[in-house]
């Protein structure tokens, strides 16, 4: 059965070659990056909208509106980030995450 042995040897060679040139960024890292970018964009849009609302409706100067909106939005942004971090903790020991190659 030399054909099966040759095939297995080729498969092992391919696997070893792939392991040696493994990409530095994996799919889960890209998913995390996309999720983080989405959270940042969402918070930015809300902050800019709040600044514009304060300027138009509140009669504040641009600088006052920026400071006020930033102070007002800091807590929700931090709570969102904390919730995302805490939600990921149970996934650390999951078989899906392959804990030896984090």
Image: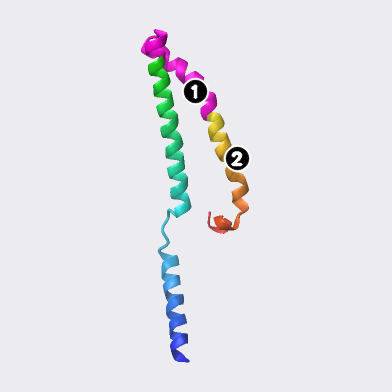
Q: Mark 2 = which residue?
A: 86
Badge 2 element: helix
Within the magenta stretch, is there residue 46?
no
Q: Residue at x 46, y 86 (%)?
A: 4
Q: Residue at x 59, y 49 (%)?
A: 91
Check the image and name the residue furthest to the bottom.
1
Which image quarter: residue 66? top left
What is the chief secondary structure element of the magenta stretch? helix
Q: Mark 1 = which residue?
A: 73
Counting residues from the start of the chain, the first of labels 1 and 2 encountered is 1
Foreground: 49 or 94? 49
Residue count near mark 2 (Cα–Cα under 10 Å), binned few <14, some 14–19, many ≥20: few
In the displayed structure, would residue 11 be above or below residue 31?
below
Foreground: 16 or 81? 81
Q: Residue at x 42, y 55 (%)?
A: 24
Q: CA distance from mark 1 to mark 2?
A: 20 Å
Badge 1 element: helix
Q: Which residues are magenta?
A: 54-77
In the displayed structure, would residue 45 be above or below residue 4?
above
Q: Residue at x 47, y 45 (%)?
A: 32
Find residue 51 and report its horizontal and vertical position in percent: 40, 18
Q: What mark, if any, has residue 7 been given in the picture?
A: none
Foreground: 48 or 9? 48
Find residue 17 and report its horizontal and vertical position in percent: 41, 70
Find residue 23 and report its horizontal and vertical position in percent: 41, 58
Find residue 57 and report its horizontal and vertical position in percent: 40, 11
In the displayed structure, would residue 32 be above or below residue 77?
below
Within the magenta stretch, is there residue 55?
yes
């Amino acid at each position: 059965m030399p054909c099966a042995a040759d095939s297995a040897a080729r498969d092992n060679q391919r696997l070893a070659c792939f392991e040696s040139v493994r990409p530095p960024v994996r799919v889960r890292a890209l998913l995390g990056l996309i999720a983080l970018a989405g959270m940042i964009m969402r918070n930015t849009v809300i902050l800019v909208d709040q600044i514009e609302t304060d300027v138009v409706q509140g009669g504040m100067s641009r600088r006052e509106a920026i400071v006020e909106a930033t102070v007002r939005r800091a807590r929700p942004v931090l709570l969102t980030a904390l919730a995302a971090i805490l939600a990921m903790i149970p996934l650390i020991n999951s078989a899906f995450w392959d804990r030896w190659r984090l």
